[in-house]
Amino acid sequence: MMAFTDAARKLKSNPPARPPDTSPAAGSASGTLANHLEAKLTNVVVAALKEAFDRDHARLELERAQLDDQRRRADEAMRLELRRQAADRELARMRLLAATALVAWLASVLVLGTRAGETAAIARVALGGGWLLLLGALALSFSAQGRINAYVPEQNAPLDAGRSGAAVLWLLVAGLALTAVSLLLG
């Protein structure tokens, strides 16, 4: 009974519980906390996105620089390959001219050997002049081949067989012409 009486007294002395406070002051305190947390989260997300974009931008710039470097190296390799091919073509041309001069000289020696007694003095002089021109063409061709073989495509010096490259052709043509004239005179 005593416990029952104590419980009744406590109920009378305590005011009834109030419903939760819905006043604007209470709402603004909890709203401010939520807004503050939301603003902080937004700032963190924006900072993370900015960092990701900056990282992507830096990566793209690095890739662009690498591509430019690769393109530059490929262009340089192509330029060197073209220069090497030009040197190979010029070397092949000089070899062809040297072979032609040698064959023409050997052929004229054979012709002179077979008709040595039948040729006139003027024909022998023309044949000798033709030999000199053909042998000069052969010597200049070998000299030009040496310069071409010494050519280094990595250096920026132009490929130049010298004036002997053009002189070889003219000496060969003149030697062949003089040898032909000697055959006609003989």
Image (spheres, grey):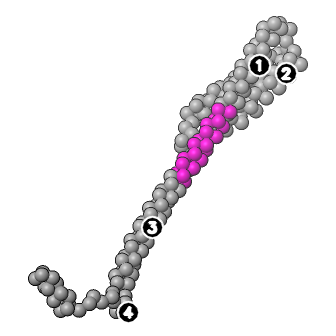
For mark 1, give the secondary structure: helix
Give the vertical position of 125 relative to 52 (above or below).
above
Q: Nearer the viewer, residue 55 or 79?
A: 55
| Of the image marks 4 and 1, the number of the one nearer the N terminus | 4
Q: Which residue is mark 1?
A: 104
Dividing the image into 4 quarters, which one contains the C terminus? top right
By secondary structure, the bulk of the magenta-drawn segment is best described as helix
For mark 4, give the secondary structure: helix
Give the vertical position of 63 relative to 167 (above or below).
below
Q: Image quadrant of residue 95? A: top right
2 vs 1, front mark = 1
Q: Image quadrant of residue 171? A: top right
Give how far apart the Cα atoms at labels 4 and 2 are: 122 Å
- Horizontal and vertical percent position of residue 134: 73, 24
Q: Which residue is mark 4?
A: 24
The question of residue 87 being in magenta is answered with yes
Please indicate whether residue 41 sits to the left or right of residue 184 in the image: left
- Horizontal and vertical percent position of residue 151: 57, 36
**What amino acid is labelled 1 in the image?**
Ala
Q: Which residue is mark 2?
A: 180
Give how far apart the Cα atoms at labels 2 and 3 are: 88 Å
Please indicate whether residue 33 sits to the left or right of residue 152 in the image: left
| Of the image marks 3 and 1, the number of the one nearer the N terminus | 3
4 vs 3, front mark = 4
Camera sees residue 132 = no
Magenta-colored span: 67-89
Q: Which residue is mark 3?
A: 49
For mark 3, give the secondary structure: helix
Give how far apart the Cα atoms at labels 4 and 1 are: 117 Å
Q: Are marks 2 and 3 in contact (CB under 8 Å)?
A: no
